[in-house]
Amino acid sequence: MRIEKPTKSRLAAAITLLTLATALTLPQVARAETVLRIGMTAADIPRTLGQPDQGFEGNRFTGNTMYDGLTGWDLSSATKASVVIPALATEWAVDDADKKKWTFKLRPGVTFHDGSAFNADAVVWNVDKVLKQDAVQFDASQVGVTASRMPTLVSAKKIDDMTVELTTKEPDSFLPINLTNLFMASPTKWQALFDKAEGADAKAKSQAAWAAFAREASGTGPWKMSKFTPRERLELVKNDAYWNKDRVPKTDKMVLLPMPEANARTAALLSGQVDWVEAPAPDAVKEITARGFKIEKNEQPHVWPWQFSRAEGSPWNDIRVRKAANLCIDREGLKDGLLAGLMVPASGTFEPGHPWRGKPSFEIKYDLKAAQALMKEAGYGPTKKLEVKTQTSASGSGQMLPLPMNEYLQQALAECYFDVKLDVIEWNTLFTNWRRGVKDPSANGSNATNVTYAAMDPFFALVRFLQSSMAPPVSNNWGFINNPKFDELVTKARTTFDATARDAALAELHAASVDDAAFLYVAHDVGPRALSPKIKGFVQPKSWFVDFSPVSITP
């Protein structure tokens, strides 16, 4: 019998069949895991137990990732303002008969990362963790970063499994916006940790349970905790079971790394250690883009200011001095020079086109001669300088480049007969001092403070600074502003439940604050971040926050 040699075509066919058969019988090779590595401006991982610290950088990275609130922010557009949308609540309404009571309908079918159900009991439990001091889960360490952001909420009551009633101490149309700051942690997970915690009493066991919860976080968010090393890294993995299927992350893992120094972050990006950095060094922008990285930026509802002391004896009590400072700053020069275009000049908390802008009569711009004239009218000049002192930080969440920027202001204001002293302290200390106020020894003789603020909602943008009852320790009226007109307009806005009329009242309040030169308004941050060209799908919204869910990265 003659054995024929296989032809090339028969050989190719045989190899194809063998390859197919092998592929069907051998285990399939898993696709490569996609990992997004981010260098944060924070010096430490923001708290992970449900209510983050580190300002809104904490909410961005460990709040809105692992957790949800009853309400949330629409972060899907780069061109439209970010507005409040339903999250764990599907709808809400204020009681027509009693404007201090609100009904919230909850989203069915939501589970925490540990598998337990989200319901009305969970909402009440989470409200009590920061408001009810005799609740076993009450955690004083979470109160300062939560209660001050929703100052009128006093209680929550279960109506049925999917309905809760929230009560405020006074009518407050801002409540649904404020609730974006209250994140829902799993009561079931916490209780299991409490039951096995050690401690001399319930309070000690509760503290131990919260410490354990921070290492084993359980929220309802699109990302789940995977690995946590304090001060070093936090690893999050996508939550395939997330209730909003449109926001199940497109990346398998996200690694968050504290990198407080801008040059170190930039170097990490350029060397391939990370794929994304917050606030790259402005003087490295050209090199970053030349090497193929993308710079993403957008005007944020965020202000870089000096907040003035209005306590007795403050040099800022003279409106001529406050206006002169605002007219003495060349914001375009700051933008084009030091910040390499990474800012928007501020002429108030809100710029023209914003519904809360209003029509201020005082135009904040660079007018050196007008500024000098005001200072001379107030009694100062080349031979008689006005000494002022500002407390600031060397870095921090949203602080941009605080030391170089303040040195720029120091030089600029010298032309208007100011002698500016700087008190530079650590960011978290500055943030803590902000709540203590100018009358506290922590002010160290300063009569202004430089803490940036988010302006996404009316309480954050205006009320906590302008209303006299928001003076420390209640909230962030650091300088003890006491203006009856401001108080009247705050009450008007808070008690107006029609959105259009409320916006009109807020616009009136904002215009009044600009006309009073309540702050030294310098810049709006643009949230600059540098991204690897491997990153796709990112949207830079007009918000302090971002949505990491649609982001993908090539392995």
Image (spheres, rainbow, N blue to C red):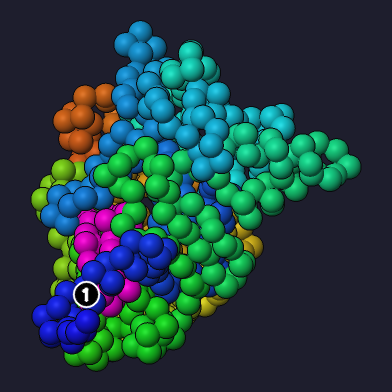
Judge from the rendering whether residue 166 lies leftward or rightward of residue 383; answer left or right: right
**Residue 144 appears anywhere in the view:** no
Judge from the rendering whether residue 356 lies leftward or rightward of residue 450; answer left or right: left
Residue at 89%, 42% in the rendered image: 200
Residue at 16%, 68% in the rendered image: 365
Instruction: Tell me which secondary structure the magenta stretch mostly adopts.
Output: loop
**Residue range of the region highlighted in magenta in the rendering:** 526-555
Tag 1 secondary structure: helix
Q: Which residue is mark 1?
A: 14
Horizontal and vertical percent position of residue 90: 32, 27
Q: Residue furthest right?
A: 200
- Position of residue 494 relative to residue 53, above or below, is above
Nearest the eye: 204 or 484: 204
Residue 126 position by quadrant: top right
- Report crowding for label 1: few under 14, some 14 to 19, many 20 or more residues within 10 A (C-alpha): few
Residue at 22%, 56% in the rendered image: 542
User: Label 1 is placed on what type of residue?
Assistant: Ala
Q: Quadrant of the N terminus?
A: bottom left
